[in-house]
Amino acid sequence: MPKETVKKVKKAPAKKVVAMKPIGAVTHFYGHLSVAIVKFKKAVEAGTKLHYKGATTDFAEVAKSMQYDHKPIEAAKKGQEVGIKVKDKVREGDEVFEE
């Protein structure tokens, strides 16, 4: 009786999970305007892809425009609270990540 040969299958290398640090947090949400007020921990430019994550929130989109004191700005400074138009509802305390 011939012996069966066993082929060894190589496992794909495990992907390294990198813990993302939040770059900001939602401090307020104006539902009738769909505008999130976000306080950033670092400078962020308009056009940056942001990911909003919370208990029931999980979506990403590009911050097309930002406003500070009802005036458009190109970038938010560290510690600054800015208004960003969002496509979905966010809640106070939701974290904001950069993608």
Image (tube, rainbow, N blue to C red):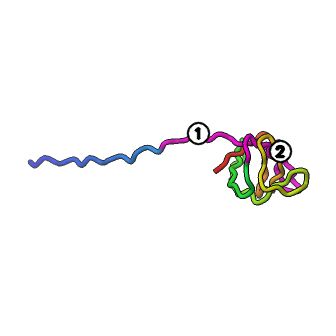
- Against 54, residue 49 (above or below) is below
Please give the name of the residue rendered at 70% of the width and 42% of the height, measured from the top-left corner.
23
Give the label, 2 or 1, closer to the camera.
Answer: 2
Percent from the top left, x then y, of residue 97? 68, 46
Please give the name of the residue rendered at 77% of the width and 58% of the height, measured from the top-left corner.
87
Q: Which residue is mark 1?
A: 19
Task: Indicate the amino acid at tag 2.
Answer: Glu
Percent from the top left, x then y, of residue 95? 72, 42
- Residue 99 or residue 35, whichever sits in front: 99
- Residue 23 or residue 57, whichever sits in front: 23
Report the Cα–Cα distance between label 2 and label 1: 24 Å
Tell me the crowding category of disc 1: few under 14, some 14 to 19, or many 20 or more residues within 10 angstroms, Cα based. few
Q: How many marks?
A: 2
Task: Indicate the amino acid at tag 1.
Answer: Ala
Q: Which residue is mark 2?
A: 81
Magenta-highlighted residues:
16-43
- Residue 12 or residue 56, whichever sits in front: 12
Please give the name of the residue rendered at 78% of the width and 49% of the height, measured from the top-left corner.
76
